[in-house]
Amino acid sequence: MDRYNFKVIENKWQKFWEENKVYETKLDKSKKKFYCLEMFPYPSGKIHMGHVRNYTIGDVLARIKSMQGYNVLHPMGWDSFGLPAENAAKENNLHPKNWTESNISMMKNQLKKMGLSLDWNREISTCSEEYYKHQQLFFLELYEKGLVYRKENYVNWDPVEQTVLANEQVIDGKGWRSGVPVERKKLNQWFFNISKFSEELLEGLDNLENWPDKVKTMQKNWIGKSFGCEIDFKIEGNLPINKIKCFTTRPDTLFGFSFLAVSVDHPISKHFLKDPEFIKFREECSKTGTTEESIALGEKIGFKTNLFAINPLDEKQKVPVFFANFVLMDYGFGAVFGCPAHDQRDLDFANKYNLKIKTVVRPIDEDNNFVVQKEAYTGPGLIINSKFLDGLKVPDESIIKTIKIIEEKEIGKKKINFRLKDWGVSRQRYWGCPIPMAYDKNGKVFPIPKKNLPVKLPENIDLNSKGNPLDNANEWKKIRINGQELTRETDTLDTFVDSSWYFIRFCSPNNKNYGFDYEEMKYWMPVDQYIGGVEHAILHLLYSRFFTMALNYKNDNFNLYEPFKGLFTQGMVCHETYKNKDDKWLSPDEVETKDGKNYFLKGNPTKKIIVGPSESMSKSKKNTIDPEKIIENYGADSVRLFMLSDSPPEKDVQWSDQGMVACYKFIQKLWTLHEKIKTKLKKKESSEGKNEELTKFTNQLIDKINKNVEKFNYNVIIANIYETYNFFNEKINDSINANSLSENYKKILSLLLPIIPHFATECLEDLKINHNVKWPLVDKKFLTSDETNIVIQVNGKKRSIVNCKKGISEESLMKIIKKDLKINKFINNKKNIKSIYIKDKLLNLVIKT
RNA sequence: GCCCUCGUGGUGAAAUUGGUAGACACAAAGGACUUAAAAUCCUUGCCCAUUAGGGAGUGCCAGUUCGAGUCUGGCCGAGGGCACCA
């Protein structure tokens, strides 16, 4: 008996699939389409286990859908602009383009070894002119639609990367890549008006039934809709300021008003610029915004002005106006009214500056003497101490009625605010899509005419110069449009723009004149199943939704609102971490263990290794496993099997060498079984009576797997397959009808095909079966049975199981039970109070003891 | 601080949605085969009992129910998201 030689066989089928263009897809309106997409990778040069898991999950689904008769679009490409190329270029003196292209070719080879059913004919790379020229055209179209604008504002400046970061790219006050605290800097930037679609982006979530709730919640919180009103406060003082506008969600607590706080960037700050105390305060605020310490402490500081604000509902009430560090200029109007009794932040501030604390809401179970002390009361209740508002129910009634009063008095109006801010897309980098804009001497903006696209990146560039390389490309910068001397925009687009429409490009990747072909786009979009890491829950997924809406905006022909109908976020691949005594990370290759508890330096059992917790694989912690080596040692099918077994796909999976070996061995065992079956089939042995059992098992299996595919329970599918092996391996020793075996085994191989495609295809060919098999259908008559196992409980505890014909009456069942010794001893001499009978399933005898 | 998710054997996990808890796999221990090892196969799995069998048991405490891993309330713990959002 031959061992299964995965190297030869996997190579053989990969070649076959490629040469016969098996996975190339074409528009075919006679067929139902299915667009299966996995998030495309950044071409770092090496695939990692995260990719392997992601693409295995997607490939299984794509193959199943294809076998089910769908016309499946399953493409792959490269998110190939970005900073690492520039950094690598500096280190190795290689042009980013060359570095990127060689990485792509290496990674493509690795992906091909996984045996994925990808249509490589549709491969795209975002750094190619063929891709980014369309993006530049979109940029101009969005500009024409008024969805792109330029403004000067404060930006998150990453001092290491020397570039601007979007809010979403700042994590804990630090750059998402550099990990260094970001600084505030004022710059002229291009923006996408994403906030224009706040409402649509929020409402759209409700229709995304096949998205994880977790992601929808995260986006919902990010968009941050809040309902309230804007109120004008009259200002008294010795400065030419008449009023300050505030946004509030709690107008009903207006009688608890005790101070008014504005941002240091508020327009009124211009009157204080000569005050050295204020300048000092403002500097302090800009510092505290970013340091880790201030975030942890969250200390509220203020600068008292000599201005006073008047409560519009009670002119007699005058309160001081402060500048405060906790008020943000880019939310609401950069000003808030403080009600310490019912807002913890306001209470902290009031305590620090000895401001009045007036309770205006009491809980239902307290009386009107209720007084807020150490903790602000933010719960429901009734309004008190508020004159004509007294007695209103908090929150709904009180807020709605107060807004009505405010509107009648014409001191403010209802307002809905969003936390979502516009998307700053300018980056001071070379390796990105050039922004197709230019300026005259006065800074007036001129879009590059569409016929002049693409704006190509200059090839000869000095990446070692300081700042933005394009800014230093003096020749490139100069441009003449309609006889006018202009200077090009030197910023490039955030790479998240590149990935905001690549899924549309895949529909018609070779369309020359425009980013997509309408007919193709309408056939393939939306993506039916999108699969990727949860780390993109906000950034990429929100931007892509926005971009799709922006393309649709003022374009009746487009007619697509949501790009991703289904979303699945897979978990990460984790591995234990190892450190030596000098606190240096060690890779799994460098350590060994005999008992699984004590680890030593490889080849040196005296050097003990400290084992850390299992964390997601990362280069910095050295806890990575190289997929290329694993595929080399165990084969693609084994790795695919392991990626799906053990943990549910949405959860993190723990890498385990033993688990990997087990999967490899299992495929060897499957091969041994295959050889046994083949021998049996050759003998054409026939035996009646053994058919039914096999057919029944197979049909029930198909049914189970169908349900588990639906729910993405791929780990359970693998368990089902192990059960199948165990079942067949036992039955093969009996005499089996050859026709029945052949028929059912073919179905089993069809079920295996999406998961371990090389193995299953080889087995099919070995049996001379056309390997272009369909996904097997369930014959429902085999799902039911005349017999059933009825669980017999006594007082809710299982005491026995009775096998009998279905539809048995409770009385007949009782007769059987009375003869059952196991049950007998419980019911003998006891008074049977009652019994609960769930037909064909369970009988519970409730007995008084 | 606010929001979300999750707590099941030594480990990864299943559980028809309120009805046999621990499928399937990894690890461990014991055994079979073998001169031996590898490979393969079988058994065990927490407590009591020689066995038959019985008991406890899904983070903890209550509750609803004939019956709770599943539903409700409270507590504890872990993970993730957000960061002064007015």
Image: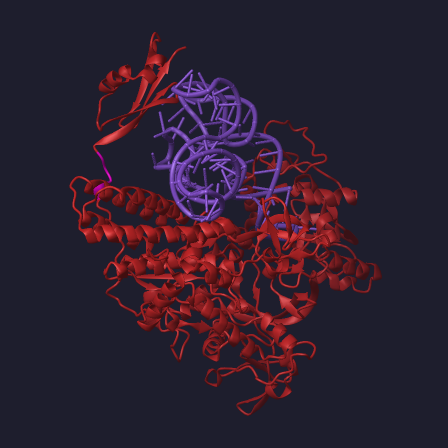
Chain colours: A red, B purple
Viewer-proximal residue among B22 and A711: B22
Residue in the picture at 42% in, 58% down: A56
Viewer-proximal residue among A378 and A215: A215
Q: In the rendered view, tell whether residue A831 sits above or below residue B18.
A: above
Q: In the rendered view, tell whether residue A260 sits above or below residue A398.
A: below
In the rendering, at what x and y percent does residue A199 appear?
48, 56
Q: What is the magenta range?
A: A780-785
Quadrant containing the C terminus of chain A is: top left
In the rendering, at what x and y percent does residue A544 appear?
47, 63
In the rendering, at what x and y percent does residue B42 appear?
39, 36
Q: Relative to B30, is B41 on the left or the right? A: left
Q: Is residue A88 magenta?
A: no
Is residue A117 visible in this depiction of the protein?
no
Residue in the picture at 64% in, 80% down: A471
Instruction: Say which quarter of the image contains residue A97.
Output: bottom right
In the rendering, at what x and y percent does residue A123 appear?
42, 72
Viewer-proximal residue among A412 and A113: A113
